Amino acid sequence: MPQDAYTGAPFRVNRAYAESVGDAWVILSAKYGFILPTFTIPEPYNVTFKRRTDATATVDQLRRQIRELALGRYPHIIGLGGKEYRAMIEAAFAGSTCALSFPFSGLPIGKMMAATKAAMAQVR
């Protein structure tokens, strides 16, 4: 499962934030697109939106998944992660009525993680 496959510190911090402030959350995988935390990842992969390949999820695929997962029902979508992930989220939700926010966007990874942890501390 993704929550077990993704083990890096940034993912762990983002997951904790999503679980503490969100009604529901999904993962944006560069290979599989929007996936639920219970999605089974069949094998390890090394795909990123920074280096696009044929294996990289497309905006059309993400838009289809938004419909399939009914992500458009949420009035507010919080995006976490780097600028490439933000760009894909913005492109996928373009034209939707969902309000998008990226509270830690533009920060270097260490500062992004610190800001995310600080925001969680205020929620508790």
Image (cartoon, grey):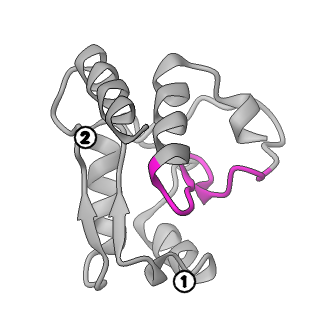
Neighbours of disc 1 within 10 Å: few (<14), some (14-19), many (20+): few
* Kind of element beneath mark 1: helix
Question: Percent position (x, y) of residue 46?
Answer: 60, 29
Residue at x 32% of width, y 35% of height: 122
Q: Which mark is residue 83?
A: 2
Question: Percent position (x, y) of residue 3?
Answer: 70, 36
Residue at x 78% of width, y 43% of height: 41
Q: Are marks 1 and 2 in contact (CB under 8 Å)?
A: no
Residue at x 57% of width, y 61% of height: 24
The part of the chain drawn in magenta is 21-39
Residue named by callout 1: 67
Neighbours of disc 2 within 10 Å: few (<14), some (14-19), many (20+): some
Question: Percent position (x, y) of residue 39?
Answer: 77, 53
- The quarter of the picture where residue 76 lies is bottom left
Residue at x 30% of width, y 43% of height: 84
Q: Decide which of 32, 103 is in the foreground and name it.
A: 103
Q: Decide which of 87, 24 is in the foreground and name it.
A: 24
- Above or below for 96 versus 36: below
